[in-house]
Amino acid sequence: MDKIRVYSIVRFLTSLALGTILPVYVLYFRHYQINLFQIALLAAIFEASILIFEMPTGLVADTYGRKISVILSALVSLLSGIFFIFFPFLFGFIMAEILNGLGETLRSGALEAWLVDSLKHEDKEEKIKYAFAQGAKYRTIGNLSGLILGGYLASLNIKLVWVPFAVIFLVLSIFLILKMNEAYKIEKTVSDRIFSKISETIKKSLVVIKSQKLILALLLLALFSEFSFETISQYWQVHFSENLFIETEYFGWILVISSAITILLIDKVTQLSERFKHEVSSLVILEILFVLSLLVIALAFSPIIAVFFFVLLQSFTSFKEPIFLDLYNKHIPSEQRATLLSFQSLVGSGGEVLAGLCIGVVALKFGLRITFGVGSLVLFLGLVLFFLLMNKNGIKPSPIQEA
């Protein structure tokens, strides 16, 4: 089968599986009496597993083959789904989250590496960009389909939402074994010690950060931003269901609307960001709008208002990503680009782990509205620190264009 078609089908099925559980992921835990602190703990365990497994699984893909890594990813994700279905208690969920993180890291990068090297082997390098575009299209279609399906299944019986997840990854495993061919040769090398590689990554990153204060400011802002986003990401389903009494069948549609807005407007927002005089302006504006939206959700008692600002918040989060990555990459020396991108990923995951350990206590003792308020405050403090670092170090962002 054509490599691009295989890649697109894998992206579609993976996103379909993940989409089915996304609208009611946290409500599934609540159905089995998992409290708010334990929900945050499970999220922290998932993110910590990604931090731990990211580099080792990358070495697996480069040493033993990308096909093996992607197949293992599907099988591990299938096993994760089985744990979610048949072991619905805290320890079972902990094991499922660890397996879920392992599955993510086995797939992360390996699938794209397989596609690029396969097309190069077939002398079709000019099709790489087209292949990624096809993958993004089918990922979006799969995600939207899964969101609708997941919301509908939850309205029938919330126990059903992990069934399609497990079935899809079973089908994907069989498909990968039969159709994913790895014809090219990769140089198989024995890996150095993993922890020394992580240490080297961090050391090189710190050297660049010391000389590039804007990068330091951006990384700290990303840390605070990820922490803040985690407060709403983990608890919006519980808040909408238990505090605002919104039916779960609408949750998938809420996320579908957010995705549709992103698809329709992200290019226009990105183009508009280039018209600001200073390069950080659009990023800061989107962060402020995020803070205000989260604050409104914390204070609102009207379901309509809460849903409206949640959709906006999700959109602002999506709009920030290309602007942040462009700004960040613009100030990274080429020779340290991979290192600094890895470090930025570690910082973002670190913020989510830190949030998972902190917000659960706040949610359990003070409730979700206070938790969202804390998320707003944390990002506000992050913005203040961002401006202080910029002014203290005399950073003058490059002017782009008068608005």
Image (cartoon, rainbow, N blue to C red):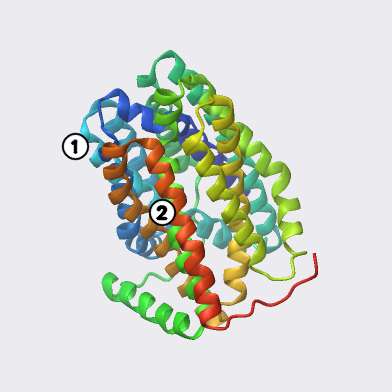
> x, y percentage for residue 57?
35, 59
In the rendered structure, find residue 227 and report the number of the disc placed on it: 2
Q: In this view, does 344 lie above or below 76?
A: below
Residue sitting farthest toward the left: 91
Say which residue label 1 marks: 91
Residue kind at label 1, given as amino acid type: Phe
Residue kind at label 2, given as amino acid type: Phe
Residue sitting farthest toward the right: 402
Q: How many marks?
A: 2
Q: Is mark 2 on a helix, strand or loop?
A: helix
Quadrant for residue 243, please give it. Answer: top left
Quadrant for residue 166, please give it. Answer: top left
N-terminal-most mark, 2 or 1: 1
- Residue 399 located left or right of residue 31: right
In the rendered structure, find residue 63 and report the number of the disc placed on it: none
- On the question of residue 261 being in view, the answer is yes
> x, y percentage for residue 337?
53, 75
> x, y percentage for residue 156?
44, 13
Q: Is residue 248 above or below residue 56?
A: above
At 31% from the left and 76% from the top, the residue drawn is 199
- On the question of residue 141 being in view, the answer is no
Question: Around disc 1, counting alpha carbons within 10 Å, would you say few (fewer than 14), some (14 to 19), or many (20 or more)?
Answer: few
Residue sitting farthest toward the top: 156
At 61% from the left and 54% from the top, the residue drawn is 286
Judge by depth and name the residue closer to the eye, 14 or 223: 223
Q: In this view, does 300 lie above or below 70?
A: above
At 38% from the left and 58% from the top, the residue drawn is 351
Q: In which quarter of the image is the C terminus?
A: bottom right
